């Protein structure tokens, strides 16, 4: 499929996303522990791991959908302001946006209106109370975002009429309209057929390499990670147990994330 990903020169600069010593527990049970990683602008990092290994919890914490017990989350060198889990609820930060397996669009509203909602955080209270009348400047930005994902011609259709792959691209356009610098994607291709999945993965990689976003994607498929990611991080039981480029991570290490590795796999 696509050419082997090249690592952007921008990785020499400070990371766009820096997570250090993240720890999260639910009802006294630790589900993430000592999780530390960076994602640079220009980089697509894939997270792999078995069910329940903590992939979504990691992204949700970074997105501010979930608080954490301890550790730090910084975007472009500044703390995101997320609160520890046991005090106030976490706060959303416009610099990060998340896309999900099931798109999370409003199906009856137009594609354009769905994308415009990415800009709600920049609108006045009055503007946001009248969501059917987005300001012209916001609509123009939304159209630019739709052009970026190749869906200009579908702007005025109800979002629910689009195919799954197209709806995922609308969700990505909404993140662009938000002005996010860090794009988080939780199994963005799991509901898509192989061709639509490839289109979405190519778009995510382009947003990193061409637009300079930092992209962190949980992927269900090791082969997609190998094909599109610049770096792969493996989680097991809430801890990072593997990190490397597709070229340097051995097949056996990835297989080991999903079960007990055979001695041959472990040695690979
Ligand atoms: N809100 C919650 N309350 C209690 N436990 C939770 C909550 N969210 C996640 N967990 C637990 O945290 C652990 C990690 O879950 P998480 O959803 O992050 O895994 P995952 O790697 O994304 O798995 P999957 O591949 O199935 O999506 C699991 O044991 C899960 O049961
Ligand atoms: Mg998950």
Image (cartoon, helix red, strand yellow):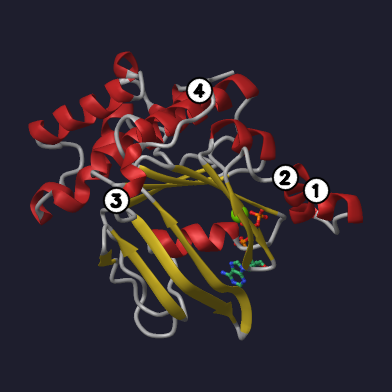
Q: Residue at x 26, y 54 (%)?
A: 94
Say which residue label 1 marks.
268
Dot 3 or dot 1: first in sequence order is 3
The part of the image, by quadrant, that contains residue 234 is bottom right
Q: Secondary structure at mark 1?
A: loop
In-front residue for pair 143/95 = 95
CB at disc 3 and ligand 1 closer than 8 Å: no
In-front residue for pair 70/262 = 262
Is 210 positioned to the left or the right of 6 in the image? left
Dot 2 or dot 3: first in sequence order is 3
Look at discs 4 and 1 and give the one toward the viewer: 1
Residue 250: mark: 2
Q: Residue at x 38, y 64 (%)?
A: 64
Please tell me whether residue 101 is drawn above or below residue 50 in the rendered image.
above
Say which residue label 3 marks.
13
**Ligand 1 image-quadrant field:** bottom right
Q: Are marks 1 and 2 in contact (CB under 8 Å)?
A: yes
Q: Are marks 4 and 1 in contact (CB under 8 Å)?
A: no
Dot 3 or dot 4: first in sequence order is 3
In-front residue for pair 46/3 = 3
Residue 206: mark: none
Dot 3: within a 10 Å radius of its alpha carbon, few (fewer than 14), some, or many (20 or more) residues? few
Q: Residue at x 28, y 71 (%)?
A: 81
Relative image position of residue 192 (x, y in whole percent): 60, 29
Q: Residue at x 45, y 65 (%)?
A: 61
Q: CA distance from mark 4 to mark 1?
A: 31 Å
């Amino acid at each position: 499929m696509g050419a082997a990903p090249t690592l952007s020169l921008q990785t020499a600069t400070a990371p766009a996303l820096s997570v250090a010593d993240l720890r999260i527990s639910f009802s006294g049970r630790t589900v993430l522990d000592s999780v530390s990683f960076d994602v640079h602008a220009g980089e697509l990092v894939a997270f792999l791991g078995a069910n329940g290994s903590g992939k979504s919890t990691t992204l949700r914490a970074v997105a501010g959908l979930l608080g954490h017990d301890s550790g730090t989350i910084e975007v472009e060198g500044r703390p995101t302001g997320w609160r520890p889990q046991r005090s106030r609820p976490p706060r959303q930060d416009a610099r990060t946006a998340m896309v999900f397996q099931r798109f999370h669009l409003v199906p009856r509203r137009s594609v354009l209106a769905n994308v415009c909602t990415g800009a709600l955080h920049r609108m006045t209270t009055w503007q946001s109370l009248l969501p059917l009348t987005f300001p012209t400047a916001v609509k123009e930005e939304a159209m630019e975002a739709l052009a970026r994902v190749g869906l200009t011609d579908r702007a005025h259709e109800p979002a629910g009429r689009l195919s799954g792959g197209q709806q995922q691209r609308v969700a990505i356009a909404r993140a662009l309209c938000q002005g996010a610098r860090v794009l988080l994607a939780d199994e963005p291709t799991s509901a898509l057929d192989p061709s639509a999945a490839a289109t979405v993965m190519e778009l995510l990689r382009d947003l990193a390499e061409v637009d300079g976003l930092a992209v962190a994607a949980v992927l269900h498929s090791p082969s997609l990670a190998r094909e599109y990611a610049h770096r792969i991080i493996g989680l097991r039981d809430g801890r990072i147990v593997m990190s490397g480029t597709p070229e340097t991570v051995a097949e056996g290490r990835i297989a080991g994330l999903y079960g007990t590795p055979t001695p041959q796999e472990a040695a690979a």
